[in-house]
Amino acid sequence: MTPLADRVPTMNDDDLKVLRANALRLVDHGSATQMTAAAELIPVIDAERERRAGLPAAPAKKRAPAKKKLAPVTGHQTALPTAG
């Protein structure tokens, strides 16, 4: 199994935020093993967040133009011609 610290670079920003909050909680209220692991993980998370902050912003994605709505069909529609 891959150690959690090795997976940090592949996580998105929201996941890193949640992981850091959980690590801080475990440092305060976890078992001895959890406290140690969480304390080692926090600097890894912080380093990754700092690295990402230094990267140029991703270009904004262009959205397709909105489709124009067609006017509703009004009036009487004629019947289809009969075969004959």
Image: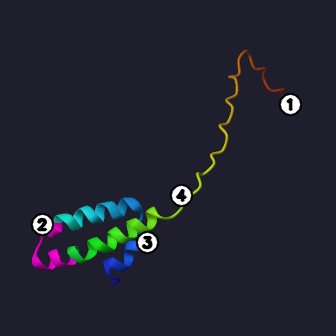
Instruction: Determine whether label 3 and label 1 are within 8 Å by CB.
Output: no
Q: Crowding at label 3, few (<14), some or many (≥20) Cα neighbours within 10 Å?
A: few
- Element marked by disc 4: loop
Badge 3 or badge 2: first in the primary sequence: 3
Q: Which mark is residue 57?
A: 4
Badge 3 or badge 1: first in the primary sequence: 3
Q: Residue at x 17, y 64 (%)?
A: 25
Residue bearing the label numbered 3: 10
**In this view of the protein, which residue sits in the foreground, 12 or 71?**
12
Q: What residue span does the magenta drawing correspond to?
A: 26-37
Badge 1 or badge 4: first in the primary sequence: 4
Vertical comparison of 17 with 27: above or below: above
* x then y, percent, for residue 68: 69, 32
Q: Please identify, in this view, whether the residue under mark 3 or under mark 1 is nearer the observer.
A: 3
Q: Amino acid at mark 3?
A: Thr
Residue bearing the label numbered 1: 83
Instruction: Determine whether label 4 and label 2 are within 8 Å by CB.
Output: no
- Color style of the picture: rainbow
